Image (cartoon, rainbow, N blue to C red):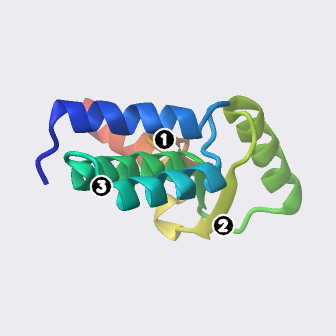
Amino acid sequence: MKVSKDAASAARRIYRLCAPEGRVDEAKIRVAFKKIAESKPRDYQAILHTLLNLVRLDEKSRQASIESATELDSDSRKRIEDNLNKQYGGGLSFEYSTNTELLGGVKIRVGNDVWDGSVQSRLERLADAF
């Protein structure tokens, strides 16, 4: 869907009003969606589309995916969670998985940020260097 600059600007403005402290307030965003759908301002579909994308991006930025070669013990999980919560200000949800292709180490993804400390990535970088 093609979104005009005015619709994108309006959606960003509404999003900032619904996320006063950097986190989306679910009640406020629901009210905003409802009011936009009821009042149907000019280009309201593009505004809703853009606003939904902004909310999805915010939701993804609050999800942490941790891959490891073996199952992590509770101390390692706690240490990772504490460090990520400190860095991102808390409110993260964590998803753990095992991937034997990593050979060792961990790979962490939070939103668009990726930390790859796996043996597999180190071997790939070494192979690329030759």
Marks 3 and 2: which is nearer the front?
3
Q: Residue at x 67, y 34 (%)?
A: 88
Q: Nearer the viewer, residue 12 or 129?
A: 12
Judge left or right: residue 45 versus residue 82: left
Judge left or right: residue 72 versus residue 29: right
* Label 3, label 2: how far apart the Cα atoms are: 52 Å
Q: What element carries label 1?
A: strand
Residue 99, disc: none
Tell me if residue 105 can be seen: no
Q: What residue type is labelled 3?
A: Lys
Residue wearing tag 2:
70
Q: Quadrant of residue 89?
A: top right
Which of disc 1 and disc 3 is earlier in sequence? 3
Q: Which residue lies furthest to the left in this view?
A: 2
Quadrant location of the N terminus in the rendered image: bottom left
Q: Is mark 2 on a helix, strand or loop?
A: loop
Q: What residue type is labelled 2?
A: Thr
Q: Which residue is drawn at 60% across and 52% down?
A: 64
Q: Residue at x 47, y 50 (%)?
A: 55
Confirm or deny contact between disc 3 and disc 2 (CB under 8 A). no
Residue 47 in the image: state x and y as whole percent: 29, 47
Residue wearing tag 3:
40
Q: Which of 92 and 10 is in front in this view?
A: 10
